[in-house]
Image (spheres, coloured by chain):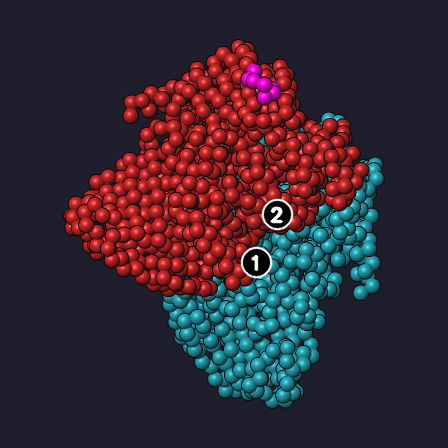
Chain colours: A red, B cyan
Amino acid sequence: MLSKPVFPVEPWAVRESTFDPAALPQTESVFALSNGHIGLRGNLDEGEPHGLPGTYLNSVYELRPLPHAESGYGYPDSGQTVINVTNGKLIRLLVDDEPFDVRYGTLRQHERLLSLRDGYLRRTVEWTSPAGKTVSVVSTRLVSMTHRAIAAICYEVRAIDRPARVVVQSELVANEQLPAMSNDPRAAAVLTAPLAAEDGELHENRALLVHSTRRSGLRVGAAMDHIVTAPGDVWTGMHGSEDTARFTATVRLEPGQSLRLVKFLAYGWSSQRSLPAVRAQVEAALVGARATGWDGLVSQQRAFFDDFWARGDVSLEGDPEVQQAVRFALFQVLQASARAEHRPVPAKGLTGPGYDGHAFWDAESFVLPVLTYTDPDAAADALRWRHSILPTARDRAKQLQLDGAAFPWRTITGPECSGYWPAGTAAFHINADIADAAIRLADATGDEEFERQFGIELLVETARLWRALGFHDGEGKFRIDGVTGPDEYSAVVDNNVYTNLMAQRNFRGAVDAVGRHPERAAELEVTYEEVVAWRRAADSMYVPYDEPRGVHPQSEGFTDHIEWDFANTPADRYPLLLHYPYHDLYRKQVVKQADLILALHLRGDAFTPEEKARDFAYYEPLTVRDSSLSACTQAVIAAEVGQLDLAYDYLGEAARMDLDNLANNTGNGLHVASLAGAWIALVAGFGGMRDHGGQLSFAPRLPTGLQRLAFTLCWRGRRVKVEITGSEATYSMVGDGKPVNLVHHGRSFTLAILGPVTFSIPPIEAGTRPTQPASREPVSRQRGRIIQSAR
Amino acid sequence: MLSKPVFPVEPWAVRESTFDPAALPQTESVFALSNGHIGLRGNLDEGEPHGLPGTYLNSVYELRPLPHAESGYGYPDSGQTVINVTNGKLIRLLVDDEPFDVRYGTLRQHERLLSLRDGYLRRTVEWTSPAGKTVSVVSTRLVSMTHRAIAAICYEVRAIDRPARVVVQSELVANEQLPAMSNDPRAAAVLTAPLAAEDGELHENRALLVHSTRRSGLRVGAAMDHIVTAPGDVWTGMHGSEDTARFTATVRLEPGQSLRLVKFLAYGWSSQRSLPAVRAQVEAALVGARATGWDGLVSQQRAFFDDFWARGDVSLEGDPEVQQAVRFALFQVLQASARAEHRPVPAKGLTGPGYDGHAFWDAESFVLPVLTYTDPDAAADALRWRHSILPTARDRAKQLQLDGAAFPWRTITGPECSGYWPAGTAAFHINADIADAAIRLADATGDEEFERQFGIELLVETARLWRALGFHDGEGKFRIDGVTGPDEYSAVVDNNVYTNLMAQRNFRGAVDAVGRHPERAAELEVTYEEVVAWRRAADSMYVPYDEPRGVHPQSEGFTDHIEWDFANTPADRYPLLLHYPYHDLYRKQVVKQADLILALHLRGDAFTPEEKARDFAYYEPLTVRDSSLSACTQAVIAAEVGQLDLAYDYLGEAARMDLDNLANNTGNGLHVASLAGAWIALVAGFGGMRDHGGQLSFAPRLPTGLQRLAFTLCWRGRRVKVEITGSEATYSMVGDGKPVNLVHHGRSFTLAILGPVTFSIPPIEAGTRPTQPASREPVSRQRGRIIQSAR
């Protein structure tokens, strides 16, 4: 059990005021900085102690063997895994030859502050060496949102009580020693020293190291440059070896004097470009950063975040803890994606090696809905990445004897990396999830050019896949058999409701896109016969329904299974998959994560309110939330059916997932989709925002714990602001824009720049609060806030 | 494609008259000798050329890693694999210093003869060395059925045309170099030199080597002794090293003179006994063999087989090719099991390393039904082995959160060794198959003592498993969800008809056994509540039925799936699992092997004749027989529904599986269950033998190709002989015995020693012959025999 640090509640920061070595894995993830291109875990400047050192570059990976006890056709035999690249954030300090190390001497003061407005991490330390010399260190670190290839650190050490000779060593280190990460000795061997030295150059304050990965053949350049400011004579020097470059600056400081080191760090990588090209790229980035300067980088960063918060902030009254968590969540979602630019948004962003650095459906189904309404350019970039891996997805479809494109369940650059097909490849819903994201983006932006260039091809190729996967049965119903839905405690089932309804949306989206872009359709060789078939499949899509029980089975036959014996499942046997065989989970009614409930959200247009209420009441007692991709969806539907306080509890869980280390594995990286889920829980839950059929609608309703909720959405080039209180909701347009048609609780209205429109919120009859499996209830927000105030 | 040697058709032998090096893998399996305890592949005496050297001892295995790309709860992380032990069948020959090697010089004559009556393999060779010296070699090899630990070889070399100095080297060799067997380098490493030398002794004509396995900790002793007979001065000597012992005899032979070497070979092994104990065991066996002498071993062997054939022979008129194949099949079934004695009967017997030497349900469902009626003591021994691994099976049940015992899908000494649980552990039917074998044996022998000691515990523990696996649904039906039936092209399905009906038989068998042995039931802590629950589960067992189609779905929902696209599946894409993903196979109607059809056979009492006919007609076009465990069952049901010529074709396939290398993998070992299936196809197919509810019944009917079929069954201490012609069947009792009640085509009658009883065979209306998937039709026996007569 990792310890859970308590971050004081404040609106625009996450702060740690006492140093807890046991919490390092978690805090390194929470304090990770990233722009979606480069990611630095929040390791201490001096490298030790650490939970897990981590420097990640989006799509820099190594191949590792995927062994199979019994092999099978189409199993991938190697997988991609993110690697820890050359660490450039190391700055070591010696005080009179004594290494600055918080494990020795006396740590008189410690603070780490992640500023959500400034986009930097600042560490402030006062430390007395074993020999009795006291220094303070203020280190500010950022990964630039405006200079994509750049990170920078401003490191200032000051002598406090007595004169001290300080030596500052700033390093680049490749092939850092890591804690053991895999129990497969072959995989461990691959990842122990993944980088082979190719080139290096040392030049006064500047150094460059170029390495390449041994199997995946990627070339990675890292470079650093330094500006030293100090009183008196500063001696500096640069040394290096194959895997290291070290810049040293030393000076004698009188009490009150300080040495300030600004370190610019640049990364460049490529699977194709030559060594000179990669070198040139890194050097150019470094020159650019140095020209902008530290202060310039800081002010650009602030401007970037100011702009984002103006667009995307969610503010609320009544729960400062959730307020903080939601801003942290949005901050991290942005960090994971802002500058990913045609590269994936991994499940952990660039904050840790969890899930091998793979991207899953999390991106399209949780992250992109947020980006679509807050940073649509980043959403478009993420879909451009999907478009870029279409060739690999087409090959995979062929290998699987299917048509169109079969996107991988997990990957970094396109190939399927799933080692267990029933919970990987069989989860074909990822294809509809990608289509869904493309449709949503087109609806929300009205950007026909993006759809013409990229979206239509995603829609057409996935529609082709679904057509090959399904078939019309004797009665004409379109069935999709043998797939795995979102819930990973069932696998390889027939007619998963979520999958079938999302495939229906996929078909219809493809038909619509083809209608809007006939020339592109011709280029993609879409035939009339295909379009007719897609329409017919969509119109006759089979959605199983359990008439006697009056609910939708998650998939055909699901409700006939025995219910999991929750009463005899102790709390310490969760997550279940670590304590029970898949065999036992698959054949019983037990739900890892929202599946049918997610269909109620994303395909809410396919259900009546009464069905939603009955389905929600049925699945709540079966859903154990062993996945972090569940609470937010349960919040959304709980809110819709009037279970507002339950929704509020789920919101809390989604939002505080990493700040409170709720899954005990934040140390492997943040749960980016759950963080995105905090926004979804607020906006789609309490805001009741839906976008079915391209119509933006709201059905706001607050839980008792919140007095006010306000958010802004980007919608077809406009900014729509929504403010909700317990009794009414006010809609207004921020800035310019033509009038837009919206819906409030089923009532259509037109919003123009003339002024805000206010509606009252109709009451809802809340039934009995449904129960969850024993020991799996969400933490009550009411209780949570009491604890908070007692801190 | 391995070449398929043509063995001339003869009733009591399998003979090879020309030497075909490409056929060596197959012929080494076909000519393998075994008593179920020791197995020697039919390698040439001189070791080379070879397909695959092989010397196996039942249950001598090594552990190898079972790697998983994504691990899961309850996955085994190491598996057992049979190893090639110390090779004692090597006898090298030098003629005037020229090694006898059929690849050099001139092979003037070559014959290998497997005598099914004598139980030995005789090789006769005439060879002219590159230097022009001609010798003949006659080598006779047997693995003794009467001396369980003994094999022996009589090797006679004769100078033909000119004087020759011959040197005969007889060896024991541990850690022989083998062709690469695995593409997992870690597994290969484990198996390259699996034996560590522990002890050795050389003593004139005798030598002993003791080794142990490195991980599994088994101790293996091998010893040899020699008797040399030759004219004139024979020089002999013994030399050795850690892994080798070599006895050398040399003499000068005048034309017509011969040297005769009798080699006695003894093996002993143990996981527990000390080095002195294992040495003593091997030495004792050797002394015993030497005392019996070569001629004694040969005559005992003949007596053993005479007895077996008197009990178990099946004779037929009209198809000498099938006659030969059926006798070969029975011979090999006996070799796999006769002296296994509390050890398993592996899928390949002891004839090759296929399937890692594991035992599966093949033993209980195919081999034991034959042994039960031909060698019931061997059947009882096989079930004693299952009884002996109950502790491991109970542990596995606990690990899987079940009750009772969960037998492994594949194993050597008990632990689950399946590396892919959906097609392994989930195939829980193996537990009912074991119960079925125990019930059958009790019914057939009337041996209450065996049931009291062993059978009841197998029945009780498996009944407990089924109770934990299934549940009564809202309507009271007992459902068993999430299991894999016999057909491996479906997995993890609900209410597999075969599984449910076999579980029903398992429940009822347990209830009956408990009723017969109340004290034992008390020892096994069987409660009244349990018995009531078993009875209730059996009585309310759910058997899905597809009303609109009028057939039984193999499992719930199976018939709703789309049919495999057989028309577009080329012949070279079989077996399908090598060319299509499991995902594709699992979600479509395509059947690897008899599943529902096997239920029609083993639980024929649960179906009406009309249901059988409709079900058979439905599944024939879906069944591809990518498993060798299918043709015999299809033969049985084809015969029952009147498709006699189709049954005959399937009989041919089952019987000639290995002689004709039909699956192209006989080189890895024989298909013992398919060979057993030849007997099943004849006796249960054309003899119509059933044993439902402990009542032995017959419904004989011959195909046009057979004029007569006769077989003898052991039944409750009696021998019942059945002779069938096209128009009538005659039943008689061989030897002594009380009268017994039998059934002929539904008509009950009493058979006594007074004399035979003859009945006419009623006609049957044969409908249209069903079709099979394109390119998967069985070879027509009519066509097969035409080819045969043209040879």
Instruction: Where is residue B257? Give x, y as percent.
Output: 60, 84
Predominant SS along the magenta part: loop
The residue segment tinted magenta is A751-757
Which residue is nearer to you in this view: A660 or A349? Answer: A349
Q: Residues within 10 Å of mark 2 (few under 14, many from 20)?
A: some
Camera-near label (1 vs 2) is: 1
Decide which of A728, B678 is in the foreground and name it. Answer: A728
Q: Is residue B621 magenta?
A: no
Q: Do marks 1 and 2 both belong to one polypeptide chain?
A: yes
Q: Residues within 10 Å of mark 1 (few under 14, many from 20)?
A: few
Is B599 displayed left or right of A1 in the figure? right
Q: Which mark is residue A389?
A: 2
Considering depth in this image, is B619 or B734 the residue closer to the camera?
B619
Q: Residue at x 62, y 30 (%)?
A: A716
Q: Amino acid at mark 1?
A: Gln
SS type, badge 2: loop
Element marked by disc 1: loop
